Image: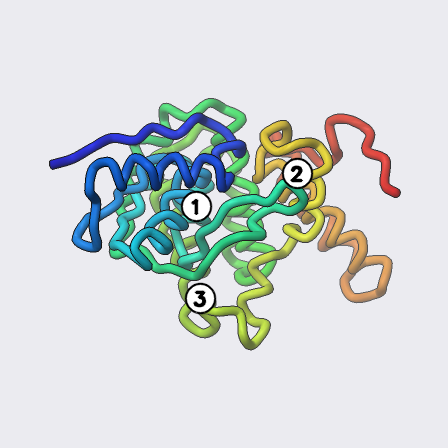
């Protein structure tokens, strides 16, 4: 028997209140450790469903079926699952690997433009931190990315997943510091998302802004050449991603 539990769209669904509501539904349906949870949707659904799977009856199998580019290349790979605390993003969670991940790239043709471009930020991130040749390939194929060329997107997704998996395999639980490199831009991004209000700034948009902040900081500290930042700015701009916050934010 299959039962569908729909979560409201948006970052607000990554909360303990929503998780508790799903627990209630699972208990009502007498779900047990033989139950498999299928997470069909974007990163929010995958993160929340994965956390539910990790904690319900101390763990049930789950399968990721991502439907957004961001989920394809990032949140469905690596086993990080969790929900937000009102004061911090992804503060409550676990490491819990899915039984499998099924990616259907045709779903990307249905994405709203803003959601699609949000995922491109994570793709660019892999090129910056891990693979200079991949970054250069993205620069050469801006038109293919902007028009969502299915063949090129399939290659991009496969390469992004492989790059992330290579790191996760070496440091699954973030004990050596290697996996922390995947957080490039995210220290700033998570702060921006919390300050702007979850859902106001898409995760990938926050990551794009955060990458530039991190790159400029590294530049000011003499760790990288200015050209590294300039290439990121040029590529993110060509992909129509924001480089500044939509509204002024006051830091105290």
Camera-nearest residue between 133 and 116: 116
Residue 148 quadrant: top left
Residue drawn at (59%, 63%) of the image: 181
Placement of the N terminus among the 4 image quadrants: top left
For marks 2 and 3, give the CA distance.
25 Å
User: What crowding class fits label 2: few (fewer than 14 Cα within 10 Å), some (14-19), or many (20 or more)?
Assistant: many
Q: Nearer the viewer, mark 3 or mark 1?
A: 1
Is 44 placed above or below 171 here? above
Is 70 placed above or below 174 here? above
Q: Name the N-terminal-most of marks 2 and 3.
A: 3
Q: Which residue position is annotated with label 2?
A: 193
Is 122 placed above or below 182 here? above
Camera-nearest residue between 175 and 7: 7
Q: Name the N-terminal-most of marks 3 and 1.
A: 1
Residue 234 quadrant: top right
Placement of the C terminus among the 4 image quadrants: top right
Q: Secondary structure at mark 3?
A: helix
Residue 56 in the image: x percent, y percent? 33, 51
Camera-nearest residue between 218 and 90: 90
* Mark seen at residue 168: 3
Is 221 placed above or below 244 here? below
Camera-nearest residue between 96 and 202: 96
User: What crowding class fits label 1: few (fewer than 14 Cα within 10 Å), some (14-19), or many (20 or more)?
Assistant: many
Q: Secondary structure at mark 1?
A: helix
Residue drawn at (71%, 36%) of the image: 243
- Looking at the image, the residue that sits furthest to the left is 1
Q: Which residue position is annotated with label 1?
A: 47
Residue 227 in the image: x percent, y percent? 75, 53
Q: Are marks 2 and 3 in contact (CB under 8 Å)?
A: no
């Amino acid at each position: 028997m299959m039962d569908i539990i729909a979560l409201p769209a948006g970052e607000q669904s990554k909360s303990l209140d929503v998780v508790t509501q799903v627990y209630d539904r699972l208990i009502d349906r007498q779900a047990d450790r033989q139950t498999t949870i299928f997470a069909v949707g974007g990163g929010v659904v995958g993160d929340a469903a994965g956390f539910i799977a990790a904690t319900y009856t101390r763990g049930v199998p789950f399968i990721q079926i991502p439907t957004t580019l961001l989920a394809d290349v990032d949140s469905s790979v690596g086993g990080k699952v969790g929900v937000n605390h009102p004061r911090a993003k992804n503060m409550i969670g676990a490491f819990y690997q899915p039984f499998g991940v099924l990616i259907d790239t045709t779903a990307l043709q249905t994405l709203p433009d803003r959601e699609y471009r949000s995922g491109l930020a994570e793709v660019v991130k892999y090129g910056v931190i891990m693979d200079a040749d991949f970054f250069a390939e993205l620069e050469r194929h801006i038109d293919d990315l902007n028009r969502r060329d299915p063949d090129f997107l399939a290659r991009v997704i496969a390469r992004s997943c492989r790059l992330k998996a290579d790191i996760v395999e070496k440091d699954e639980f973030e004990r050596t510091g290697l996996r922390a490199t995947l957080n490039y831009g995210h220290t700033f991004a998570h702060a921006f998302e919390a300050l702007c209000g979850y859902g106001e700034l898409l995760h990938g948009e926050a990551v794009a802004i955060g990458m530039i902040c991190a790159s400029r900081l590294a530049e000011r500290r003499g760790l990288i050449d200015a050209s590294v930042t300039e290439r990121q700015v040029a590529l993110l701009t060509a992909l129509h991603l924001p480089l500044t916050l939509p509204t002024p934010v006051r830091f105290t």
